[in-house]
Image (spheres, helix red, strand yellow):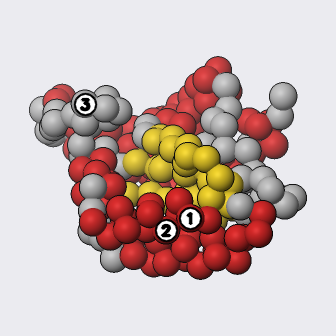
Amino acid sequence: MGQTDKSSGIDCDTPVTIIVKRRPKLDRTEDFEKVMSGTTKDAMTFEGHLGANIIRPTKAGDYYRIVFKFDSMRNYLIWEGSEIRQQWLERYAEVTLGEQEVEILSGLETWFTLSGEESLVPPPKYKMMIIVWMSIFPLSLFLNYCLIPFISEQHIIAQIAITSITLVALMTYIVMPLMAKLFHRWLHCN
């Protein structure tokens, strides 16, 4: 295990999703949009930046949500401490009301955060558990059925390592994004 960021408790090598909420001054919305666009463009030049989504409010005077992802907490912290970001924060102060609200997500809850989603609150843990189990169980059966004939001569630790690494990669990049979309309505209903 690598180093852990003391303020968030997140391992420095863990991918993170950052959600920033800001409310522009009513008469400065256009200026706010320009600052937000510039900040996003500059953030994209930093190592490990994986993209950003802007969720605009449905009514005037409400919060904007800027959702961006970094491949590691370490790379996010480099952006967060950068001089260019500090300059953008000074510009935000001129066009926003109050302080920004920042939420950093890592792990399971990021599987259930959809881009463009108005409510970015993760679903209840029991629903996440059910979806993860519904994904892992058949995938484990399938992988064991497909991989074991090829790796059965390996030591049991090697078999488990190969199977688990394949399982985690498939879950992260294919299965969970698909399951989050398929079960979106159920996951986010009250």
> What residue is at 62 percent from the left and 59 percent from the top?
96
Is the residue under label 2 in contact with that under label 1 (CB below 8 Å)?
yes
Nearer-the-camera pick, 111 or 2: 2
Q: Quadrant of residue 35?
A: bottom right
Graded by Cα atoms within 10 Å as few (under 14), some (14 to 19) or many (20 or more), the crowding at tag 3 reads few
Name the residue type under label 1. Answer: Glu
Residue 190 percent coordinates (x, y)? 84, 28
The residue positioned farthest toward the right in the image shown: 59
Q: Secondary structure at mark 2?
A: helix
Q: Amino acid at mark 2?
A: Arg
Q: Which residue is at the front of the view, 185 or 88?
A: 88
Q: Tell me: 171 left or right of 22.
A: left
Give residue 94's mark.
1
Q: Which residue is mark 3?
A: 6
Could one spot residue 171 in this view of the protein? no
Q: Is residue 47 visible?
A: yes
Of 178 and 38, the residue lying toward us: 38
Q: Residues within 10 Å of mark 2 (few under 14, many from 20)?
A: some
Q: Locate residue 70, reporting x and y percent.
A: 37, 58
Badge 1 element: helix
Q: Amino acid at mark 3?
A: Lys
Q: Which residue is mark 2?
A: 91
Residues at badges 3 and 1 in contact (C-beta under 8 Å)? no
Task: State which quadrant residue 31 falls in.
Answer: bottom right
Look at the picture and state if 96 lies above or below 102.
Answer: below
Above or below, comparing residue 41 to residue 103 in the picture: below
On the image, the x and y values in percent for residue 136 come to 51, 35
The secondary element bearing badge 3 is classed as: loop
Residue 146, x across and y down, in percent: 40, 47
Q: Is residue 8 left or right of residue 121?
A: left
Residue 103: assigned label: none
Q: Residue at left 36%, top 49%?
A: 15
